[in-house]
Image (tube, helix red, strand yellow):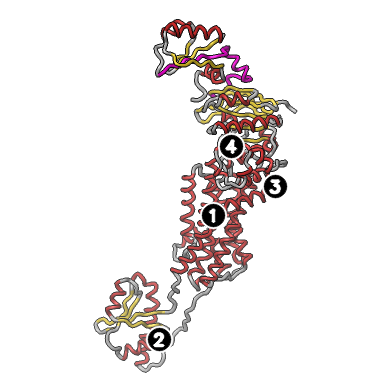
Amino acid sequence: MISRIFISQFRMGLKLYVRRPAAIFWMMAFPLLMLVGLGTVFSGSADTGIKLVWAQQDALSSSDQALQQALKELGVTVEKITPDQAAQRWQNGKLPVMLEKVNNQTSLRVNSYLAGQGMPVVALVQQGFLMTQARARGAGELARIPMVMESPGGHHDGPYAAYLLPGLLGLNLLMMGVFSICMVDVDFRVKGIYKRLATTPLPRHIYLAAQMSVRLVVVILTAVVLMLVGAVLFGIHNQGSYLALFGLILLGTACFASMGYLLASFASTVEAANGIANLIFLPLMMLSGVYFSLDSAPEWLQKASDFTPLTPLLKALRAVFNDGAVLATQAPSIMIISVWTVVLFIFATRRFRWV
Amino acid sequence: MTDLAIEAKELHKSFGKVHAVRGLNLKVQRGEIFGLLGPNGAGKTTSLEMLEGLVQPDSGEIRLLGLDWRAAGNDIRNRIGVQFQSTQLDEKIKVREVLEMYSKYYDKPRRVDDLLQLLQLEEKADAYQLKLSGGQRQRLALGLALVNDPELVFLDEPTTGLDPQARQSFWDLVRHLKNEGRTVLITTHYMDEAEALCDQIGIMDHGQILQLGTPRELIASLNQPSYAEIEFQGSAPDAHAFVAKIGMPVDVKPQHWMVALHDPKRDLQHVLACIESLNLPMQQLHVRRASLEDVFLQRTGRSLRE
């Protein structure tokens, strides 16, 4: 009989879910819009290769020509523009470094804000200068350490959309928890919809299990559609096993649905629920690596973020989806998510009340 | 098996400083319709929620069908039906769907088609519940209370806000429940409803039952079978002379006066004689029999419909 109740609650839950257009939008259309929108807007490939802007008016002197040759050998792409154009782009803060003529002397100008990008170019230019000097003296080729520049591959390569897609899967799970579950739960309780159920023999845990199962179906559907659109529009494909993805999504659903119910148990009004939901949602969304990696954030923040439930989930999702990793390699992340899930689940089910 | 469907002893419940229920005692026989009659704020809903197992009493005992809530909660839930004053359901759930969903909670549910027929909701079976009229929604709520073929049914002010026809329809359904052998506990602030439906009535105010009895017993306890209501065009004149002359208690109101008649035939003649001799501008005279409203007024000093 328990399974009969579960199946009936599950089917009814699905039917009712589909009848709410707002829910469908936020859970399914929103991630799609984000993928298509952000993926398209940020589709410009990252600058690969070393580029140097050279402000030149007149013809190049012979020493300049030698430098240009040396730079070419070193793999530096030189872009020649007029001093006026160079001044313009410099003012706009877009040039990390440029070569120009000051007092008839070829000199380097480096943007202090973009020093990180500028200095490698500077090193190569200095190298090129030494090479021309050595050649001019007839001293033979300058010995140097071989250098090769390439992308590490995986999600560091490829379009932004590929990085974003697993992030949106995680975001979907987070939103499911704090909005679809938490807000609706408080709303139902405040309206008194649960009160009627309290007079029936419906067990609370069956109700919760059915609700979580409904959300699982929705999340999986969303993931499938996201991946389809990702493949068609951006040529992104799952590099790992679909089973592994499903396992992570299943774990994530249990985790964030539990979180939703637990948060809801602390709110006695819809306004309070809204506050609690956003208090958790905004930091997690911004600092878990949904839209951008936290690689350049301070160490302490990265460490802290690694122990929240969403960051390890996204790490694991990206490892599978972008890098084709096997779940076993993600054991540490999966451990952290699992601990969160168990703790959140226990407290959520303990605190859930009809009234 | 006990004869008592409901037994409540010395129930107390406070919310902060408000002592909502102060020593409620109740005995409801199997198969009877029991009414808790009282105005808003009397403590009816709180009492009902304690009996329904939704609220824990601060003190006192409850036995439903001989069972205790703490020991046999699910057993009780399987055998009772509950209708709230206003039942909140998911907006977009359909009538048939909600009845079917609820019926799955129970071991031996009734057939949903039979219920739809009983409730006269067959045409609305596939309508969203929020599209129902007030009367239809209350019938649906009653249906939810009946899915499990309950022995005991709780109805909280079920006809509040319904038009007269909807109320009559609902009353027919409640009488039908009794014919089927079920026990019904109904709370209401409508005197006519209590009189029409109930075998026993408990008059309730300020968290206590003030008087218990059949409608007839309660009215007889007034010792005043009838009332004469004297109506005037516009406002009533000064009553002093009339009160002095008539020698009976008069309830003086701005628009009308009320005189209780112990012996209707004799007292009525006396009233008319006084009016005649004082040449009062009486426009109408109603003589009505005593009602539960009068019982309530006498017991509590206030009207049921405050």
Instruction: Indicate the secondary structure of the residue bearing disc 1.
Output: helix
> In the drawing, what numbered circle is on residue A176?
1
Alpha carbons under labels 3 and 4: distance apart:
29 Å
Q: Regarding mark 2 in the picture, which secondary structure is present there?
A: helix
Share a chain, discs 3 and 4? Answer: no
Q: Does the magenta stretch include residue B216?
A: yes
- The label nearer to you, 3 versus 4, is 4
Under mark 1, the amino acid is: Met
**Tag 2 or tag 1, which sits nearer the N-term?**
2
The magenta stretch spans which residues? B206-233
Name the residue tied to disc 2.
A72
Q: Earlier in the sequence, mark 3 or mark 1?
A: 3
Question: Looking at the image, is mark 3 or mark 2 earlier in the sequence?
Answer: 3
Q: Is residue B213 above or below residue B67?
A: above
- The mark tally for this picture is 4
Residue A2: give its label: 3
Camera-side residue of A321 and A127: A321
